[in-house]
Image (spheres, rainbow, N blue to C red):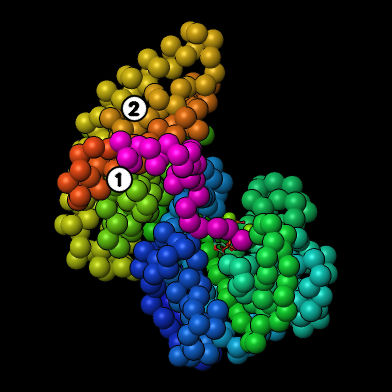
Amino acid sequence: MESAEIRRRWLSFYEERGHTVVPSASLIADDPTLLLVPAGMVPFKPYFLGEVKPPWSRATSVQKCVRTPDIEEVGKTTRHGTFFQMCGNFSFGDYFKEGAITYAWELLTSPQDKGGYGLDPERLWITVYLDDDEAESIWRDKIGVPAERIQRLGKKDNYWSMGVPGPCGPCSEINYDRGPEFGVEGGPAVNDERYVEIWNLVFMQYERGEGTSKEDFEILGELPSKNIDTGLGMERLAMILQGVQNMYEIDTSMAVIKKATELTGVEYGAAHDSDVSLRVVTDHMRTSVMLIGDGVSPGNEGRGYVLRRIMRRAIRNMRLLGATGPVVKDLIDVVIEMMGQQYPELVSDRQRIETVALAEEAAFLKTLKAGTNILDTAISDTKESGGTVLAGDKAFLLHDTWGFPIDLTLEMAAEQGLSVDEDGFRRLMKEQRDKAKADAQAKKTGHADLGAYRQIADAAGETEFIGYDRTDGESR
Ligand code: ATP
Ligand code: MG
Ligand code: MG
Ligand code: MG
């Protein structure tokens, strides 16, 4: 079943059951706490929090999502992309656990000729939160899932919360058993690649209070209404329905892998490392196109930096695969062709997307060679002097002069067995930022003397720079 059909069936299933179809919001979150949208519920957050009265009691969407924290998994696991689409259904004080579970089961298991996805019920495994007897009994007694295919998991996987105070509640997940070729038996509690998580049903029921982490907090009481927020990974379901090995090989991605093999002459399937690179390129080019499509431009801060590091990582992986010239135009043309079926604005906006992407590629290629030479020298100097840590000022120089995002330096150093003094790097970044601020201020006030600002900065002491850590997209 093609991705477009998965999406069509999703929306019509829920529309037929009284849900209003809401188009995907932009990836640029209309929310000061998030850089980019990591989940389908984000546009509905004010309704869940009770800040705004929802215009409907049921909604459904297929939301574009970006999760940068998953970047390290890309290409290595079969199921993590930095960009993916989350199919969701939402109840604002309408149906609750039983309704959400019944709908999910019906849609997944009804035969394909009856409008469902036709998954074999025997392959579906369920997880519920530790003490959620209610959800377990719905699955077991009402739906008929055998008790041995229902597992209980703790807060890390099966409890969701947002903000303090904010809504929270247990969740229940549906996982698909891909069979013994994906590893040992034992259910999703044991093996998350074989029993791949496809759908998370969140039961938003309580109000969360203070705590020390996402796994340790107080529960203040019940919310005035009980809500449902669910998310199914469209690419993960496509991977299962299309019988492919991983989410990069589905109908809307495989052509990008093919293009990358053509451009590099490296065959897909030839070796593990080159396969990972091909998948990284595929994922990152998709994400780049979607981000630029929504108006993000490469830069050194915030969303612009997310885009820059993703694009540069893709370009570098193409070099690792053997490409020598520019590759971005050919790759994004394929991405636009694939994704343009669902997002026609990519096609009408092709010119602008290309201009932005090609300028970034040109800027990076211009400095890549010189930067790589500097990095190689720094690495061999470090090794020769018996060190194992590349100095922070080298990482800073590479960033500042040669446009190497820190994770590129980290990755290239790691390939040579070195770590990087990230604290030192961040300190220098912070100093530079303070100086830029002081300069801007001086320009505004006409005072060229920066002494006063320096003094303030010194007196304030060291501030940890966290801008390159997780900036968005918490998993749950
Ligand atoms: P996982 O445990 O596999 O990392 P998750 O628990 O972080 O997934 P949720 O936050 O529950 O995922 O998101 C809801 C659904 O979105 C998941 O069940 C999955 O189908 C999909 N999903 C989550 N992260 C990704 C990703 N990086 N790429 C593709 N699909 C994803
Ligand atoms: Mg999970
Ligand atoms: Mg996750
Ligand atoms: Mg989950």
Label 1: how many Cα within 10 Å (few below 14, some 14–19, many 20+):
few
The part of the image, by quadrant, that contains residue 105 is bottom right
Q: Which residue is drawn at 27% across and 61% down?
A: 295
Mark closest to the chain's N terminus, 1 or 2? 2
Give the residue number, with chain letter if any, for mark 1: 437
Residue toward you, 115 or 301: 301
**Res 221 visible:** yes
Q: In which quarter of the image is ligand 2?
A: bottom right
Q: Where is residue 334 in the image (x, y as percent from the top left)?
A: 28, 53
Q: In this view, does 312 lie to the left or right of 170?
A: left
Element marked by disc 1? helix
Q: Where is residue 4 in the image (x, y as percent from the top left)?
A: 40, 70
Screen quadrant of the C terminus = bottom right
Q: Where is residue 469 in the image (x, y as percent from the top left)?
A: 49, 46
Q: Which amino acid does label 1 sit on?
A: Lys
Q: Which residue is drawn at 67% across and 53% down?
A: 192
Magenta residues span 451-476
Give the residue number, with chain letter if any, for mark 2: 397
Magenta: main secondary structure equals loop
Q: What residue type is labelled 2?
A: Leu
Instruction: In the rendered view, tell whether residue 411 sits above or below residue 144.
Output: above
Residue toward you, 433 or 296: 433
Instruction: In the rendered view, tell whether residue 156 sits above or below residue 133.
Output: above
Q: Residue at x 67, y 71 (%)?
A: 208
Q: Is residue 382 left or right of residue 102?
A: left
**Res 106 visible:** no
The part of the image, by quadrant, that contains residue 227 is bottom right
Q: Where is residue 123 in the image (x, y as percent from the top left)?
A: 69, 64
Instruction: In the rendered view, tell whether residue 327 sits above or below residue 46.
Output: above
Residue toward you, 244 or 167: 167
Q: Which residue is drawn at 54% across and 18% down?
A: 388
Element marked by disc 2? helix
